């Protein structure tokens, strides 16, 4: 099943993973290969206009992924095993790989190889490491519930849960490799090469902040977790550097917990937030301990505020520059949630509180891994635009002399 993986040949023809023809022919070929054995059929409306071509291809890609996992769940004979290998190859060759499992084919293969070669995961009866990891990434990347995915992949809930937890543990075991706290840190180029920041922030190593993620908790505990969002959330406290990589992550605090209380816990717990001597993180507004620099209180401190308000004094000028640097924390959280919607979902999650906490850690590990091997510039640009539209950005006064 070799062939080019370009998605559109002409207006009505496609070449999808080596399957060539119009979209209906490709879909029929994939359905025939899948042979789910459950009486399951995916209904797709007729192609009405060219704009729907991409949507139809994504559905074909999902069918392809389902078949890969399904074929591996059987006791494979040589013919099915060969077909499974071929289809997995097609998944990692097509550009739709990024839409389905939220990373490039090359990054997917590197991740699987890292998990396999380290001994953290291995092929098991009826399923390869690639098959297990693909299922996991589909769930966290599409915010799918694990009680619906077993149906798609023709597995029992118990089997699927066991495999999901196996991948989750494997990825979390990479935490020490990819969630690395800074030690002796040089001045980052973003600061060193910009006279708005250097030498004023030369000892800054990144930013800290919090975000919320919805959780499922017992009714009696709901008031502790319900903050401003109106539904139970857990707080994700994190630190990141100016390369948009997490250097520390603490998840699990109830949604009503205060920022200062979580920060104190992060600095004093066994696996604590470490700040090298003479260095500091940028923090949120309010009293901060040594090693965390906050903006001035009672003056403008948010970037959007400066879009229609020029700095009037030294304090406001400092807050503007502080906010410009601290914005990296918002962007990093934004990319994390955009890539892994299971964290940002507004629907009540299917997974337990503890499992969701572990999923958050795993997604942060995956984020850092991908920021090394698969930087998605388009996604970063989309998040940047969503958080700070061009019309706001253009009106922020970036060059101000000290008053």
Image (spheres, rainbow, N blue to C red):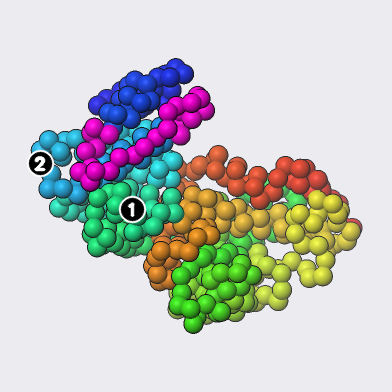
- The residue that mark 1 highlights is 149
**Residue 158 in the figure: left or right of residue 21:** left
**Residue 11 in the figure: left or right of residue 107:** right
Furthest toward the bottom, the residue is: 220
Mark toward the start of the polypeptide (1 vs 2): 2
Q: Is residue 249 above or below residue 52?
A: below
Indicate yes or no whether the magenta region holds residue 336.
Answer: no
Look at the numbered discs 1 and 2 and tell me whether their residues touch, using CB distance below 8 Å: no
Quadrant where the image shows the C terminus? bottom right
Q: Position of residue 374 (x, y in %)?
A: 45, 43
**Residue 35 in the figure: left or right of residue 222:** left
**Residue 399 in the figure: left or right of residue 123:** right
Indicate yes or no whether the magenta region holds residue 45.
Answer: yes
Q: Quadrant of residue 42?
A: top left
Residue appearing at x 52%, y 54% in the figure: 337
Residue appearing at x 76%, y 54% in the figure: 304
Question: Mark 1 falls on what kind of element?
Answer: helix
- The residue that mark 2 highlights is 77
Q: Is residue 114 visible?
A: no
- Foreground: disc 1 or disc 2: 1
Q: Is residue 62 above or below residue 328?
A: above
For label 2, count other residues whose C-alpha is less than 10 Å away and answer few (under 14), some (14-19) or many (20+). few
Q: Is residue 80 visible?
A: yes
Q: Position of residue 348 (x, y in %)?
A: 48, 64
Furthest toward the left, the residue is: 77
Residue appearing at x 23%, y 46% in the figure: 38
Q: Position of residue 198 (x, y in %)?
A: 72, 53
Stretch in magenta: 31-55
Question: Mark 2 falls on what kind of element?
Answer: loop
Quadrant where the image shows the N terminus? top left
How many marks do you count on the picture?
2
């Amino acid at each position: 099943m070799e062939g080019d993986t370009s998605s559109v040949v002409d207006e009505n023809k496609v070449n999808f993973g080596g399957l060539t023809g119009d979209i209906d022919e490709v879909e029929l070929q994939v359905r025939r290969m899948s042979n789910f054995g459950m009486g399951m059929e995916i209904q797709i409306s007729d192609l009405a206009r060219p704009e729907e071509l991409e949507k139809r291809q994504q559905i074909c890609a999902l069918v392809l992924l389902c078949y890969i996992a399904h074929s591996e769940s059987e006791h494979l004979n040589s013919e099915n095993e060969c077909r499974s290998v071929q289809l997995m190859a097609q998944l990692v060759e097509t550009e739709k790989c990024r839409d389905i499992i939220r990373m490039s084919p090359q990054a997917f293969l590197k991740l699987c190889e890292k998990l396999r070669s380290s001994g953290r995961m291995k092929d098991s009866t009826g399923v390869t490491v690639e098959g297990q990891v693909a299922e996991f990434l589909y769930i966290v990347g599409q915010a799918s519930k694990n009680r619906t995915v077993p149906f798609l992949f023709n597995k029992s809930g118990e089997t699927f849960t066991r495999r999901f937890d196996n991948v989750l543990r494997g990825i979390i075991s990479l935490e020490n490799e990819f969630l690395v706290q800074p030690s002796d840190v040089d001045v980052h180029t973003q600061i060193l090469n910009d006279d708005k920041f250097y030498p004023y922030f030369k000892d800054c190593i990144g930013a800290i902040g919090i975000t919320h993620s919805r959780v499922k908790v017992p009714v009696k505990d709901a008031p502790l977790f319900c903050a401003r969002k109106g539904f139970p959330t857990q707080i994700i406290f994190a630190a990141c550097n100016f390369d948009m990589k997490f250097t520390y992550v603490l998840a699990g605090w109830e949604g009503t917990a205060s920022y200062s209380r979580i920060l104190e816990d992060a600095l004093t717990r066994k696996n604590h937030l470490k700040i090298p001597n003479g260095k500091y993180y940028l923090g949120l507004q309010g009293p901060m301990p040594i090693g965390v620099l906050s903006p001035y209180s009672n003056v403008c401190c948010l970037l959007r505020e400066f879009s229609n308000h020029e700095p009037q004094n030294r304090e406001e000028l400092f807050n503007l520059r502080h906010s410009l640097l601290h914005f990296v924390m918002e962007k990093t959280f934004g990319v994390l949630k955009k890539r892994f919607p299971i964290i940002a979902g507004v629907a009540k999650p299917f997974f337990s509180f503890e499992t969701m906490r572990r999923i958050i850690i795993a997604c942060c590990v995956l984020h850092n891994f991908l920021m090394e091997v698969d930087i998605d510039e388009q996604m970063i640009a989309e998040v940047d635009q969503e958080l700070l539209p061009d019309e706001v950005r253009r009106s922020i006064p970036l060059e101000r002399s000290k008053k």
